Amino acid sequence: MSLELRNVAKRVGKDVHIHETNLVLREGAFNILLGTTLSGKTTLMQLMAGIERPTSGEIWFRGRNVTGVRVQKRNVSMVYQQFINYPNLTVRENIASPLRVAGLPRAEIETRVHKIAELLRLTPMLDRRPSELSGGQQQRTAIARALVKDADLVLLDEPLANLDYKLREELRDELPKLFADRQCTVVYATTEPSEALLFGGYTATMHEGRITQFGPTPDIYRRPPDLLTAKVFSDPPINTAKVSKKGGEVSLGDKIKWRAIGAAATIPDGDYAVAIRPHYITPSAAGENAVAIDCRVLVTELSGSESVIHFDLGGQTWVSQSHGIHPFEVGSSARLYVDVGQCLYFGADGASVGSVGGSA
Amino acid sequence: MARIALDSLRHSYLPNPQQDADWAVQKLSLEWSDGGAYALLGPSGCGKTTLLNLISGLLKPTEGRILFDDRDVTLATPEQRNIAQVFQFPVIYDTMTVYNNLAFPLRNRGVAEVEVDRRVREIAAMLDLDQMLEKRASGLTADGKQKISLGRGLVRSDVNVIMFDEPLTVIDPHLKWVLRSKLKELHRHTRRTMIYVTHDQTEALTFADQVVVMNQGTVVQIGTPVDLFERPRHTFVGHFIGSPGMNVLPCEVRGGQAMVAGAPIETANAKACRGDGARLELGVRPEFVSFALEGLPVRIGKVLDAGRFRIVETRYADQVIKLLLPEGLPVPEGEVRLRFDAAHTRVYRDGWMVGA
């Protein structure tokens, strides 16, 4: 194992920024911190890097207690959301700067800079200054500088957030390749569930200064161990409601009922929270587990290839996401179908109940 | 409210533009009807903000005219054009209450207090701000502040057009859903002419009735979201819209038959294609490619899990072809073949759709 947080907490005055946290990251793994702005991702990274000191607890790296060891004394690189480069240095000098500081021989610096520039497609820009580059190229330069020194721990704090949508797609594709043959441990913070999914690796979901869960990304997405994690890891927002199970039947309010299948099959009678992802609610019945719901359409968003329908279901706003263009009239009543085999159930304490098949 | 017409508009930041690359916005004519929802979509540096500034009057065009209804406003100041703008970062007065922030654009124009009060409360109700009117703006969250910005853009009833410049870029994904559907609702409610500038295809496609796609100063397509998805007129549109974007593969056309690396592919438009040395490409979106018993033989490469579906990268010769596989279906093994939906597979000539 590489990085380990043991009972780490961070308080500033009376405010708890990070609640007591335990986390073990594997050597060479790609790890994602997923959570909203202010959920604690940046603070946690600063603790990992040694930029901030924990109020309590210990940080271990490769079997060594590094709590209180300053960032300068540790082989850590960090990339921020804002592109940070030296404005009066060329791209070449920017990338070389950490190696110069480390006092590497000139020839070695030259070789390494060229290799990383090639990897990040910056070779034609090496003699330009950051102001002469596009946003994507500026951020590539910052990433190149972070990678050039072969850090043991690379922390990427929403590095793609300020980039154009399409550029983000490109760099998202490239990033894992950059780390493929390195030994470093990577931590990547993002607010976007879709980004976490596409990176794969391991995900820690964060909410209000706590890690709610940590594990292999597809598992956390498909089998969220608690309701909060399911909510953090869903875009569009996951639909939730109170339901009760009695006999072999689950009921939502007094009108909607379905056979207790899937995760509901094995749970005892009682009250639960149900959660269902928007793409399991569609305008046409798909499969034998489709249950009709009648609702009132609030807003329709048609994107050219799919429809997102926001609707009111007994006082709650739910969302359906489906293929094709389904131009429901706003304010009209509509019949949609829920694939109840895909419902997730949670007990009063928020913990997942019943077993979820969850095929990929 | 107004109908907006751009008539042979062209703009350069240089004093003596000579070649194509000197123009920030290439010659452009279009008409937007009163009360419509429009989007300008393109990557950074494509000219969309320049175009927005030309319409708002912050810039004077090098050539051409801008008409609001039938009035020529080409030389009019932003104030004279009577436009409301909402920017990427919330522009509000932190020390003022939410109420006073919303009232500001009206009071500034000398609107009577009775009317101010009526308008502020109406807009606040639409944006779910009515419970916090007496709060100071400084205490609000980022999306709360951006809601006020939207409200300030919408509060005046006399504006010709409301322009939004990347209003949701700094907002978290789960709040984007809320604000986006709010904005959609507000447009439906008020029927103001709205122009929305963004690099985010989802925002543009879900907001607008008609989207103007720009690249390198040129308008490459104007169309409905369905047009842009199903009939991209240029490979750039195919690539930029859709995630992942359209597969674009070098091809040949012989006797009206498209060929990719020697393999014949059925298309919607190859018959109309003349070769004559132009660069020919085949475009097909991942959504219109599927595994089949017959078709192009490929090797399976990387598979990415996107939750609802997987993005499967396949290889034929040295070409990468992506397709989407719904959740729950297995990735086939062994001898794998691909079928392209011929109605949505097209030949592009020097980037442009053949026969468009």
Image (cartoon, coloured by chain):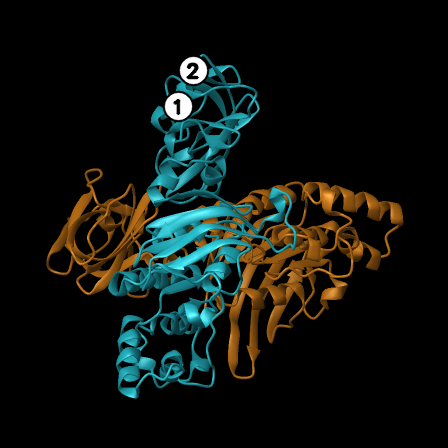
Chain colours: A orange, B cyan
Residue closer to the observer: A61 or A41? A41
Q: Chain of mark 1?
A: B
Q: Amino acid at mark 1?
A: Asn
Q: Is residue A275 left or right of residue B260?
A: left
Residue farthest toward the left in the current orientation of the protein: A255
Question: What residue sits right under mark 1 in the picture?
Answer: B269
Residue closer to the observer: B253 or B177? B253
Question: What residue sits right under mark 2 in the picture?
Answer: B256
- Circles 1 and 2 on the same chain: yes
Q: Are marks 1 and 2 in contact (CB under 8 Å)?
A: no
Residue closer to the observer: A329 or A322? A329
Q: Amino acid at mark 2?
A: Gly
Q: Which quarter of the rendering shows the C terminus of chain B?
A: top left
Q: Position of residue A162 (x, y in %)?
A: 55, 58
Quarter residue B207 falls in: bottom left
The tag on residue B45 is none
**What element does badge 2 sit on?**
loop
Q: Position of residue A351 (x, y in %)?
A: 34, 60
Q: Is residue A66 above or below residue B346?
A: below
Q: Is residue B222 above or below residue A102?
A: above
What residue lies at 29% left-to-right and 59% top-to-bottom?
B35
Disc 1 to disc 2, C-alpha distance:
8 Å
Q: Position of residue A188 (x, y in %)?
A: 57, 55
Residue A1 appears in the picture as rendered:
no
Q: Position of residue A6 (x, y in %)?
A: 58, 65
Q: Residues within 10 Å of mark 1 (few under 14, many from 20)?
A: many
What residue lies at 62% left-to-right and 66% top-to-bottom?
A46
**What element does badge 1 sit on?**
loop
